Each structure stands twice: as C-alpha cells, then as structure tokens.
Image (tube, helix red, strand yellow):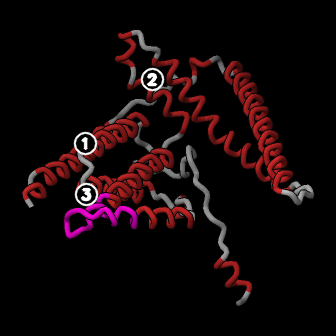
C-alpha cells in the first residue's frame, strides 16, 4: 500500500461544529433569527403530535432544500463515529425481536422512525446554527417574548443569559480541547498495579476538572469586563433587525408543506 493510499484511508474525522455559522450570503442566511426560531418551534410541535413518516419526510425535504439554498458544504457535516453505527445496529436488532405488525417488523419500523425523527431534529438545529449569527439569537428571543413582559416576566434577562451562554459555549469547548490535548502530551507515570493506575486516573481527573473550572472563571471575568466596556448587558439583547417580506414567505412555505403532510397522513394514509 502506498503513502497516498494510507492518507486516503486514514482521513481525520470531522468534529461537530456548533454555534458557528457557515460563511456565505444566501436567502436563508438573511432571514431574521426569530423566523428561524419560530420554524424550529413549529416543526418540533408538529413532530411531537404527528411523528409519522410523511411529516418526517416533509421536514427532511425542507431541511435539504434550505441546505441547498444556503449552500452548506458537505465538509460541515460531522463524521459519524463507528461506535454509533454499532449502537444503532444493536438497537435495531433488539427492536426487531419485539415483532409486531406489519409482518413482524413493527418494532424495527418503530425504531427506524424514532431514529429518523432524531436525525431530522438534529439537522434542523444544525441548519439554524450554520446560518445564524449567535449575536442575533438573543435580540430575536427578546422581540418574540415581548408580550410576556405584560406578565412581568424578565424576558430581557433571559435573553441576556441565553446570549452569554451561546457565546461562551464555543470558547469553552476550545479551551477544554486544549486542556485535553495538553493532558495527552504528558507521559504516563510508571505504575504496574491496577490500584496505582486507578489512583493516577483519579488524580488526573481532579486536575482536569480544576483546570476547567479555572479556565471557565477566567473566561467569565474577561467577558464581564468586555460587556462593561461596551455599555452593559442592555446592549446584548438590542438589535435593529426585524422580520421582512422574505420571512413571511418562508413561514408561509413551511406552513403549507407541513400542513399538506399532516393532511396527507390523516386522510390518505389513515385509510390504507
């Protein structure tokens, strides 16, 4: 086997990328963040009450069309680990032994439907993450929750807390990866007995947790200083972005497709 073959077979796995939009300028990118949140909420409610194959296929078609319009590259998709495929195979085999209609494959079909539902919901969240700037989510939540202010609900505070969590999440992931990489570079101390190895693992776990807490506190202090320098937390939930005509058309398209899928499932497929 040549060196080129080795490089082709030992390709590095693509990690999961969250809360980082894919660069680009498309109709999906330009949609208001609140519109995307409304679509996610509506589709989640729809799949909760009508988790059939038709509705799942309709939502999957919407996600695929949105990904094509947004020009999401294949490199944005994470690599599925091998252990997950093994877990799905074991789960499918266990569900198949449950039997049931039709023709004794009811358990397997139910497992496949739940798996497809989970994949569709994950893809829906990934589409929002890939096409939406994190800074736009908190102002959208504050705008959508404006009617709740009449009930004295602190919507702005919730939006600020959400914004800080979304901004800190990618930074903390990077910090934890650096800590884990630095830990792997350390040579393992000599220890032959199983008791010494367990004590060593416990000490290393405590060291990693302590370092992670220290890094988190340091990041929180730096973020607090940056927020104070920029005018306080009131600026986080403020944004001039508002829905436009494209957002209305997007909501109409989603409503028509999902409504047609529900009607088809309740009428035509219910009689078969």
Percent position of residue 182, x then y: 82, 51
| Residue lying at 50% horizontally and 22% vertically, measured from the top left | 158
Q: Is residue 80 visible?
A: yes
Element carrying mark 1: helix
- The residue under the point 66% across, 67% down is 12
Q: Residue at x 54, y 37 (%)?
A: 134
Which of discs 1 and 2 lies nearer the camera? The answer is 1
Q: Residues within 10 Å of mark 1 (few under 14, many from 20)?
A: few
User: Which corner quadrant holds the N terminus?
Assistant: bottom right
Residues shaded magenta: 92-110
Q: In whole angstroms, how far apart are the C-alphas of marks 1 and 2?
A: 27 Å
Query: Mark 2 highlights which residue?
Result: 142
Q: Earlier in the sequence, mark 2 or mark 3?
A: 3
| Vertical arrangement, residue 264 with respect to residue 226, above or below | below
In the image, is 152 to the left or to the right of 102? right
Taking the magenta stretch, the answer to whether it contains residue 101 is: yes
Q: Earlier in the sequence, mark 1 or mark 2?
A: 1
Which element carries disc 3, helix, strand or loop?
Answer: helix
Discs 2/3, front: 3
């Amino acid at each position: 086997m040549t060196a080129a073959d080795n490089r082709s077979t030992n390709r590095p796995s693509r990690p999961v990328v969250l809360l980082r939009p894919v660069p680009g300028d498309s109709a999906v990118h330009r949609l208001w963040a609140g519109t995307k949140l409304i679509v996610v909420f509506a589709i989640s409610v729809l799949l909760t009450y009508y988790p059939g194959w038709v509705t799942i296929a309709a939502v999957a078609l919407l996600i695929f069309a949105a990904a094509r319009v947004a020009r999401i590259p294949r490199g944005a998709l994470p690599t599925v680990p091998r252990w997950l495929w093994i877990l799905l195979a074991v789960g499918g085999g266990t569900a198949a032994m449950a039997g049931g209609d039709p023709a004794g494959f009811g358990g397997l079909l139910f497992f496949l439907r739940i798996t497809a539902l989970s994949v569709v919901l994950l893809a829906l969240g990934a589409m929002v993450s890939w096409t939406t700037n994190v800074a736009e989510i908190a102002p959208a939540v504050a705008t959508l929750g404006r009617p709740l202010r009449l009930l004295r609900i602190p919507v702005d505070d919730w939006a600020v807390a959400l914004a800080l969590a979304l901004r800190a999440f990618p930074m903390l992931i990077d910090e934890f990866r650096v800590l884990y990489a630095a830990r792997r570079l350390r040579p393992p101390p000599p220890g032959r007995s199983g008791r010494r190895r367990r004590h060593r693992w416990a000490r290393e776990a405590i060291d990693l947790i302590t370092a992670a807490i220290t890094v988190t506190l340091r990041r929180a202090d730096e973020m607090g200083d940056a927020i104070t320098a920029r005018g306080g937390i009131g600026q986080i939930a403020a944004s001039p972005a508002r829905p436009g005509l494209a957002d209305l058309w997007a909501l109409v398209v989603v409503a028509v497709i999902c409504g047609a899928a529900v009607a088809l499932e309740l009428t035509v497929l219910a009689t078969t």
